[in-house]
Amino acid sequence: MGSKMTAKKTMDEYLPKNAVIEEILQETADSKTLTLRPIDKGSTILKYRPGQFMMVSLPGYGEAPFTFASLASRDGRFQISVRKVGSFTNALHALKERDIVGLRGPYGNTFPLSKIENKNILFIAGGCGIAPLRPLIQHVFKNRKEHGRIEIIYGCRAPRDIFYKNEIESWRNNPDTAVHLTVDEPDQSWDGTCGVVCVLLPKIKLVPKNAFVFLCGPGIMIKLAIQDILKLGFKEGNIYASLERHMKCGVGKCGHCYVKGKYVCTDGPNFSYSEMKKMGIDS
Amino acid sequence: MNKLFITHEDLKTFVEALKKTCDEFIGPSRQHLNDIAFGDVKNDGEILLNYDGNTILSPRTFLLPQTETLFEIKGSIGGKVSSIEDKKSRIFYGVRPCDTLALSLMRRFFLEGIVDRPYQDKMENATFITLACAKPCSERSFCREIGSGPVAKKGFDIQLVAINRGYLVESGSKKGGAILRKYKKLFIVSTPSDIKESKRILKDFAKEAKPINYKRLAGIMRDDLVKESVWDDIGLRCVICSGCITVCPTCSCFSVTDRMNGTSGVRVRYCDGCPYAGFTRMAGGAMPKPDHKDHIRRFFEHKLNVDVERYGVPSCVGCGRCIETCPGNISIRKFIDDAMASVKK
Amino acid sequence: MMKKVLTTCPYCGVGCNFYLDVRDERIVGVIPAKSNPVSKGYLCVKGWHAHEPVQHPDRLKKPLLKENGRFKEVSWDTALDYVAKRLKGIKDKYGPDSLAVCASARCTNEENYLMMKFARAVLGTNNVDHCARTCHAATVSGLNQSFGSGASTNSYDELPYMDCILIIGSNPTEAHPIVGWRVRTAIDNGAKVIVCDPRRILPAESAELYIQQYPGTDIALINAMINFILKENLHDKEFIEKRTEGFDELRQAVSDYTPESAAEITGVEPEAIKKAARIYASSKKACIMYSLGMTEHTVGTNNIISMANLAMVTGHVGKEFSGLYPMRGQNNVQGACDMGALPNVFSGYQSVTDGEVRKKFESAWGVKLPEAAGLTLTDMMFKAIEGKLKCFYIIGEDQVRTDPDTHMIERALKSLEFLVVHEIFLTETAKLADVVLPGASYAEKEGTFTCAERRFQRVRRAIEPISGKTDGDIIIEVSKRLGYEMESEPSKICDEMASLSPIYSGVSFERIEESGLQWPVPAKDHPGTPVVHLGQFRRGLGKFIPVTHKPPAEVPDREYPFILSTGRLLFHYNTGTMTTRVSNLLREFPRNFVEINPDDAKAIGIRSNAKVKVVTRRGELVVSAQVTDKVKRRVIWMPFHYSNEPTNVLTNSAFDPVCRTGEYKACAAKIEKI
């Protein structure tokens, strides 16, 4: 007789775990930043690293992917930023503090944290694309001495659409750091740069050789910005884009985010430009 | 090849005995006129122990149903969720070799990396009895050319090969071996003439088939050498019926939605895939590839290029079901020829 | 428990079959039926998802009674007693013709038969009609005049072998995809397809010739084709001589329509008209496929007659591999007509004004029947506004969203004293009702549907009715409360219908079990009729009826410079009550939109996805613009599926004088940038 079958206990990856909304900040007219705290203190979700994402679940509305928009605080809280784009995000916007959401994760790859040590780093973000980069920015500032020069380029449609305004100002206080902002539609209060993010590239004072670039934003921004920074001498393998795709499961099964053999949810969402070229995509 | 043999009569006894050992016995049965479909024949319905042709849908529909409940939700905000488990033991009888290969590819996909619990539940409790093909099931199938038939090489627990006086029987797994041992009284050792007969049948079957060089095909697709006119034609033909992704034994993509009735409900997943524009369209409305032809291209590339690189074989198993259900008369078989012809040898 | 139930698709009129995959009383999927002669294992995207709306949580489960403007759930007995009491009260007070019944092209033949019997035998009125009025009534009236039978002349399976298919005002790939498959196959077999459509639809991409006429100019186009055919001597003299009458009148009437003169009206190059005429006339096996692009006009009946003329001039009718294919829009709109859910005929198109016929039905039903023809749906609405019609009993139709000029329809329904609606979801029409009776979907009933090739096919029960009753059950119970007992067993209802209708005499559940039956089936041993008018037209000689171009009721002017036309999308079905409840279908096209030509868009200063306001004399709607060269300059197009963004607030209720079908396909509109 064969040995007794032992039932392998598999975790049901699709079951969300509850988290409470501790704080809601109105970020821009159509975006909010929610501070979440998983109810289970030992939640594995808190082990996330910059660049990863989670699936947020709302009964009746399903699920949608959101990147962690901050590092986790010591007491087990983190943030997500939500722009209203459809029925799910509308429903998230309708929630109040103390309401509960379901979470699954962390999913996806992380930014190459060890590779960027002692390197110069350029961040390029557009609109709410600053959110996925924010944990990494917080990480490099937290470990400021272990990194080279840091420059941040951030473009928005209008001044009122800028995310994390106070924090961005505080980033400027770091040594050997520059923050450049630009908007498409300036208002009267705006005395900064106007135009797409690429117009700021001539302003950077960081040696491209061996430097790393991290981008996130609308597809067209990623595409155009990569074209321009390649011309400046940044290396394809050192340029990382955080990609957005339609996602339903987060674990490489549902197929929505599949691109030429890669699943953006498990192989990404952060890809180097050399990987993107193999996948036949530019954003 | 030291195979066992079972007579027609004893196969009936074998099947009847097996029916008592499982919760559901999934076998082919005749529906209206010539339609053959898998269904639970444990307690009623007449099973076809041997049959020509193939079932309309593959066993995928039992492991990854068109719609499937993932878990229950009680209470809207902050509600409780609890898994719905389906751990029924199922024996699948009469699975064709093409579908057998498909099942082993699907098993790999769903159980590697992060495990898909609902699929695993069902797969772990399933036993597969494959029935080799004695003649081509339709003009549109090409298992011989793609290498998935007429006999299965692996992926089954037990495989039957029909010959005149009964069936040759082989086990393909520990589970299959144990079953054969349990019912060993029903099996005898096959004779050399039985083996000879089966070889002749299979040889006749594969007579005119020319193997598809799928490695070369994968290379052509990877290097983007397929003529654009081939994709253009496919783009104009596809009418987004979603039939191909529903009938394909190796299509695994799904979407997730909640069905609420007041404050309680279920989260379900349902068949989804490449042909839909909405499959890749993002919440804000942007689409990575807006051209319709690229959606079908994604489907073909996954089957014929990426999976060859990943699994060593294409995940198109040549069953021909997508060809038979396509209202645009798109044929993946014809595509293979067109793609190969895009590059001079 | 697992079972597979073979049934007929509930969407368009093609009549595809599939198995519903039922596991533990839940329908989890569909399996195409390869052995079915109509669909042969093919389905469109709606069919592949036909299981999803059936058990949707929004389904109505209990009767709703309106009290002080709000619905409350009541028991079946309460609801049915109340309905019967009110119907009787209104009939006694105002007479039987103050009541009207709207039968349903979504329900089975047996249910439609019961409904028309209910109207005539129980309520005592011929005021019974259904949504064929808003789609193919023109086909019935037009083809009846020309050929003597108002249905498709030939069968689907001839299509792949045609040498030429003239598609006019029909979008088979989107609206009738499995007939679209046959058109695709015909093209692959070498057929020359001519697409005439104001909108550059997908088949146009693979067509031999694409003609983009202005909406509402079809008679000019077809008459010009006939004119050219006669001039080039391409007509079938023998056929005209032996099988038709009235040719000289036709010749006279089309003499004014040269390709050159028609070009001005239609906006089509004369050469294209000539080429179309030459291909169609000189092909050996040629047919015409049309749909609501031809019928939904104030000249709908004449549009149909003009096509009949074209077919007869070239001898492309009355034989195999020829004919006219009216593509029916709903699963059983053919059947609802066949069953006599029309104000002027009993089942089998037997006139209510014919004394002999009436006597036959009177003796079978044991009651005295009304003698005068009843009101059409169009007229019911006018009579309701006038206050002459007091009560409307609607089964499975959403007039508020489907009929043209929504605001007028709402006014009509609100003028009624009593409105009863059978529905499976709470539609806009149901919301106006005094009583809503929860009906059953196709998956919950036994019966038959008749598809566009006149084929009776079985509908089978996969799950028990969610509300506990089918629409047939409800009719029977209301009828019983009004003192009239009716047969309840669907197969016996079918037998009763067959015994009273000569063209369906041979129809029975037993005989249609295997592959259905195409009517006429005049006897129990008759094999059915794939091709009608073989050797002889139903009316004897085919009749040429001269028709002339008349512009739509509303033409563009300085204030409203665009022609607005409307139509269907592949992913949705009519008012979307079912398809918008299927995630994959809704996701493809979640919102209403308007298609506009790039030149016009530029002139107005809008880009794709910009919000615009579409305005007509009847209403306005804000939707997003889709800039596309599918439509030509001065023409805009909108789908009509969205209940919360209803296109029919814009459309014109001007109607055809013969068949009373509204002009959905052409009205004047303007577009305002927002």
Image: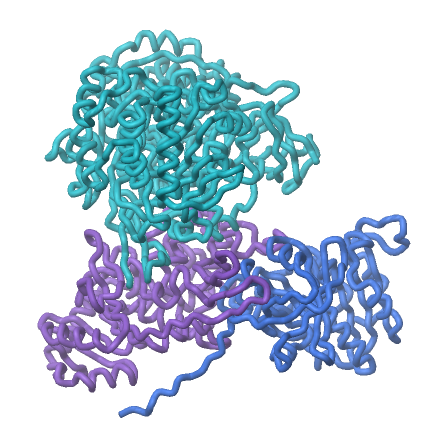
Q: How is the image coloured?
A: by chain
Question: Colour in which chain A is shown?
Answer: blue
Residue C102 in the image: above or below residue A21: above
Q: Is residue B234 above or below residue C254?
A: below
Residue at image position (50%, 21%) is C385
Name the residue: 50% across, 25% down: C415
Question: What residue is drawn where x is 13% and y is 85%?
Answer: B185
- Can the viewer see residue C209 in this picture? no
> Which image quarter holds the N terminus of chain A?
bottom left
Left or right of B111: which side holds C159? left
For chain C, the rendered hue is cyan
Identify the image quadrant of residue A165: bottom right
Please state if C276 lies on the left or on the right of C36 as rendered.
right
Quarter occupied by residue C375: top left
Identify the chain drawn in purple.
B
Spot occupied by residue A117 in the image (x, y as percentages of width and height):
75, 81
